[in-house]
Amino acid sequence: MKTKPRDKALMTLLGWGVAFIVFFPVLWMALASVKTELDAVATPPKILFRPTLENYAEINQRADYLKFFTNSIVESVGATLVCLLLAAPAAYAMAFFPTRKTKDILMWMLSTKMMPAVGVLVPIYILAIQTHLLDTWAGMIIVYTLMNLPIVVWMLYSFFREVPKEILEAARMDGATPRQQLLELLLPLSLPGIMSTALLSIIICWNEAFWSINLTASKAAPLTAFIASFSSPEGLFWAKLSAASLLAIAPILVFGWLTQKQLVRGLTFGAVK
Amino acid sequence: MRFARFCGMTALGLIAGTLAAQAETKLTIATVNNGDMIIMQKLSSAFEKANPDIKLDWVVLEENVLRQRVTTDIATKGGSFDVMTIGAYEAPIWGKQGWLVPLDDFGADYDYADLVPQVKDGLSVGGKMYAAPFYAESSLTFYRKDLFEKAGIKMAEKPTYAQIAEYANKLSDKKDGIYGICLRGKPGWGENMAWLGTAAVAFGGSWFDEQWKPQFTTEPWKETIKWYLDVMKKDGPPGAAANGYNENRALFATGKCGMWIDATVTAGYLYNPKESQVADKVAFAPAPITDANPKASGWFWSWALGVPASSKNAEAAKKFVQWATSKDYVKLVGESEGWIAAPPGTRMSTYSNPEYKKVAPFADFVLNAIETTNPAKPTVKPVPYTGVQFAAIPEFQGIGTTAGQDVAAALAGSSTGDQALAKAQASAERTMKQAGYPK
């Protein structure tokens, strides 16, 4: 059945409309970042204004962006790598050698995501103190790994299940060990899925604010802590906060843009299938 | 030979570098993102220059996030911070717990006698000061003199709540987007309840009686809430239940409010044309009173710097606190940032400085407001706690925030004032019983 041109135009318009609504907060944030503080809080909102870069200059003067940026990169990429190392064998075992309890284990793993993080703040904080991992890269990588592990296992499990069992059986017939099957067959076959899982994990780590603010101070604080430092209980801060937020999301926005094909494929063929 | 020399030099360099790093003390300072603290961060290079063996690392956070962060750290003896920015609420509670290092050995140069006594007392337990005051504030009534003139009214020298309601009614011009009065509505013990708690004191009320029984359902609280809801619904801005200090400050600074009763520290911003569109139209009067408590004079708050007992660099941290709260620091701010930016409310010498008085027409007024507030005896009837807009007990945060949510719901129209107070009372009684009061 062919789509009528009018319907097609309507769908296009709807698509653009929804895209604009989704994009609007980012656009508004970008606009606020080049306003003065008074223009940023003006009611009714100012559409026409004289743009200024003074917020960026002040942010640059007050905080070391590069330090926060480096911490964000190391922690999100580090946690994603450790997560994949742990999750791949687990998902492999569950996808190809399931037992009666496999589904229960998967559900239990997912259920840990439902617990509010603040409920375990004090025990984790004390553990971090005693293991000297407070405000360190290693501490944050461990916490992010634990935080993302359920999602990563679930996603990899779904991708692995897409691989026909017969291929692995054929490899077994040819004498391949489980390790060889995983490393030489399964991983290359599900590489697109693994990549999209990794991308999603990096994005989740990058945006995580609760643990990063609570478990870091000056050494390992990532960009979420950088944003938080520009919010204030006293005084006008919207313009500076917008500028800081834009600086914080810019790298991940570009990263997401460049990898959107893989991301979309991962999300549509993966765990949310 | 050349290679051996190179290796030797490298090794020497590494050893020297390690020794230098060991000799250097790193202080991690947790602070809020308020204007005065940003200036402190900016000027701290002067401290580092004078103390080359001490390096400062800053952790700047929003007030509520900071409070949660430093509370977790100090209660678990985490030792993440060497200096913490805390308020008049935390200092006595944490001091009593032994979580803070006493700060009463700064020496004669520090001039303890120059500290405003009420501020110092508010940060002390058993005569020992546990946090050094950085700036302090009370509350004032800010108003627009041009709008008052236009309405043909004059602000009373010491306004009453009844008069404020009258003025608000006359100033309102909702068609032109002018609201007679703007007050805090956002729920939170430090937001709407700080304002309402102070008003309740002026109406003759208190948080607790001498037996630690919560007082939300007493007559003064009922009158307070009735006044607040009436005036806000009639002459307040729309969506007031979402307006905290910052939102009201933006509304007043952009010319939307006829009056605003809030922190004295705001005066410096409202008189600054860079921050306020109404800089030449602002005037101020004391916080309102009622016949039930004609001596009431607004709230009392101070931001202070404390050194946690878990700090591994307590001596260096004390050195920094001493520098940042000294008379010399006030002078440094005055000379480099302009005297209007000098941290207010902590040192008597600031208020006798002619240069400060010249640029801050509100100076005496603010000092008077702070001096006439007595957090140790805040209410008409005797009470077992200290604090005006808060009661300095650990249970208060929860009680205040829950009550704040009930009152905000009433302001948004989903319950009545009496229902909100009854709910707050029941919840507060439950909390106090669980905590084992009366103790």
Image: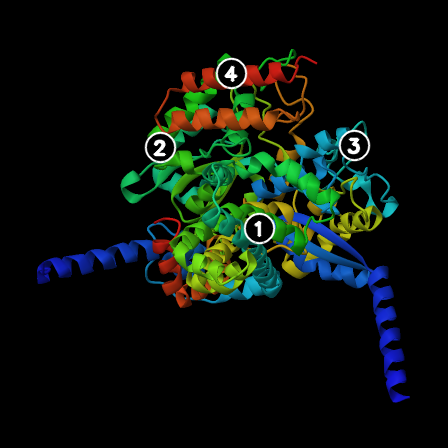
Q: Distance between the residues labelled 4 and 1?
A: 44 Å
Label 1 marks which chain's residue?
A
Q: Is residue B95 left or right of residue B357?
A: right
Looking at the image, which residue is at 73% across and 32% down? B94
Which of the two discs, 3 and 4, sits closer to the camera? 3
Image quarter for residue B140? top right
- Name the residue type under label 3: Gly
Q: Earlier in the sequence, mark 4 or mark 2?
A: 2
Observer-nearest of B3 and B49: B3
| C-alpha span from label 2 to label 3 | 47 Å
Q: Nearer the viewer, residue B74 or A11?
A: A11
Cα separation, mark 2 vs mark 1, equals 53 Å
For label 4, the residue is B425
Name the amino acid, label 2: Asp
Query: The residue tagged with tag 4: helix, strand or loop?
Result: helix
Q: Which of marks 2 and 3 is in front?
A: 3
Q: Distance between the residues labelled 1 and 3?
A: 36 Å
- Identify the subunit bearing mark 4: B
Q: What element carries label 2?
A: helix
Q: Is residue A243 above or below residue B244?
A: below
Pointer 4 local density, CA inside 10 Å: few below 14, some 14–19, many at least 20 = many
Which mark lies nearer to you, 2 or 1?
1
Label 2 CA crowd tier, 10 Å (few <14, some 14–19, many 20+): many
Q: Name the residue under label 2.
A: B235
The residue identified by callout 1 is: A145
Q: Which of marks 4 and 2 is in front?
A: 4
Query: What residue is at 65 percent from the left and 52 percent from the top?
Result: B59
Q: Which amino acid does label 1 sit on?
A: Thr
The residue that label 3 is drawn on is B98
